[in-house]
Amino acid sequence: MSSASVRAYEIIKAGIVEGRFVPGQRLKEEELTVLCDVSRTPVREALQRLASEGMAALMGARELRELYELRTMIEGKAAALAAERMSAETLEALRELAGEMEAAAAAGEPSGLRLAPANAEFHRRIIDAAGSGRLEVMARSVVEAPLTVRTFERYGKAQLERSMRHHRELIDAFGARDPDWASGVMTSHIRAAFHTVAASLDEGPS
């Protein structure tokens, strides 16, 4: 992709992930060219790439449920494998990331600053620790897509605290090298995130 196409891709993708586009909204090329400050060709290339990743059509409740069901299966399995294969170095990195997320949450920072990026890195390291190339390929299409930033923006204090507890329990499960425990916590973690985002779709854009 050209630099202009990459720029359009990143801007449009950010709009989807952060919930700036309304579910069901048609993305019009002429409006996107103004938003991205590029011509129509880069916008079309960006939309084609997003379509191949399942993100060009904004997700409604049905699509969201399907995406999270896939994510539950993939990350649940990844957590189980990671519990058996994770290095001490990766486990320590997860502890540091959990601490960073807790500090960001306690400070009330916007989720896009530290919380969402640290969360993405937390989940990426678990998938990497699973040591499965097939899982890693499948995870790329479903783990990043489900509105991570928007999820945190919809969390109240109790939901955010629950998410932080899940991270710490996952670390405990990995430390104990217990695949069933790790898989169970990861499944609960992702299901809780799904219900938060699904509720936000029912309420409409804020």
Image (cartoon, rainbow, N blue to C red):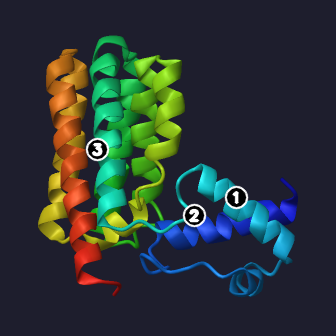
Say whether residue 119 is left or right of residue 72: right
Q: Residue furthest top?
A: 84
Q: Mark 2 or mark 3: which comes first in sequence?
A: 2
Q: Amino acid at mark 3?
A: Glu
Q: Decide which of 148, 139 is in the foreground and name it.
A: 139
Q: Amino acid at mark 1?
A: Gln
Contact (CB < 8 A) between labels 1 and 2?
Answer: yes
User: Which residue is labeled 1 in the image?
Assistant: 48
Residue 79, how many percent across, how many down? 30, 27
Q: Mark 3 or mark 1: which comes first in sequence?
A: 1
Q: Quadrant of the C terminus?
A: bottom left
Question: Which residue is painted at 15% across and 31% down in the image?
Answer: 184
User: Which residue is labeled 3 in the image?
Assistant: 69
* Element class at badge 3: helix
User: Which residue is labeled 2 in the image?
Assistant: 56
Residue 77, how many percent across, how many down? 30, 25
Say whether residue 199 is left or right of residue 135: left
Q: Amino acid at mark 2?
A: Ala
Question: Which residue is painted at 21% across and 27% down in the image?
Answer: 182
Q: CA distance from mark 2 to mark 3?
A: 19 Å
* Element class at badge 1: helix
Q: CA distance from mark 1 to mark 2?
A: 8 Å
Say whether residue 90 is left or right of residue 189: right
